[in-house]
Image: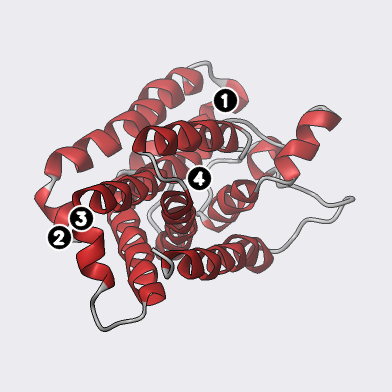
Amino acid sequence: MARFLRNRARLVMGLAAPMLFLFVLGGGMGSAGGDLGHYQAFLLPGMLLMIVQGPAIAVGTEIMWDRQSGFLRQMLVAPVRRGALLAGVCLGGATTGALYTLPVLALAGLCGVPYHPRLLMVLCESTLLAFALTALGAAAAVYVQRPESLQAVSGLVMAPAVMLSGAFFPVGSLPPWLGATVLVNPLTYGVDALRRTMPLPEADVPAWFQDSPRWWGWTPPVTLELALIVLPALAIVLLAGRRFGQE
């Protein structure tokens, strides 16, 4: 959190790309009219995902540079459990991700999403998603020893995962091979939980706006979707904590 507050340029750069997608791409697609008029509101949960992944990657990079500079070794001699240090890093990344989402949720009205108390639930779900992504980034930093390798791995994993999460397009009418890939992607359920919790625009919305991933015709509830995000993240923190203890 101290690093976050000191580096305001990172906050601006972290918001720049999602804002461009939301208001330039979303506004351009929405100007086509018809059903696409709701595309900006449909895109909003996906942009929240893009925003919270920034702190996750940054946490992994910071752990890597702390190891190389020797600062990590000074932390490891502290009289606390090493797993607790890693858990604290993940909680800090989740809090940072939640702060990133606040400016976007404040602009939800410009995207056609009405201001409603349910946006507070969206904020809580974004925090859980940020925790999961931060846990993944921290675990990658624990197991990968070279900064350039970490950046390559992060880009190789996160780019297709975000694209295949339903952040940019509905998932219900995809080809079978692509639909199966979407269903095994955990980020799909994070984006869908955000979209189903978010208040709908006042005007009638098309059917594809409410399209959710289905398991043999059954749509999982939001609580189960959140569990599919949080439980693997906790397991990742435990496994990475054991490896972290061997530093």
Between residues 34 and 7, which one lies in front from this camera angle? 7
Between residues 208 and 34, which one lies in front from this camera angle? 208
Mark 2 Cα-neighbour bin, 10 Å: few <14, some 14–19, many ≥20 = few
Contact (Cβ within 8 Å) of mark 1 with mark 4: no
- Spatial CA distance of label 3 from label 1 is 52 Å
- Spatial CA distance of label 3 from label 2 is 19 Å
Residue receiving disc 3? 70
Q: Secondary structure at mark 2?
A: helix
Please state if 60 lies on the left or on the right of 71 as rendered. Answer: right
Residue receiving disc 1? 36
**Which mark's residue is nearer the viewer, 4 or 2?**
2
Disc 1 or 4, which lies upstream in sequence?
1
Between residues 97 and 220, which one lies in front from this camera angle? 97
Q: Secondary structure at mark 4?
A: loop
- Spatial CA distance of label 1 from label 2 is 42 Å
Disc 4 or 2, which lies upstream in sequence?
2
- Residue occupying the point 24% across, 34% down: 13
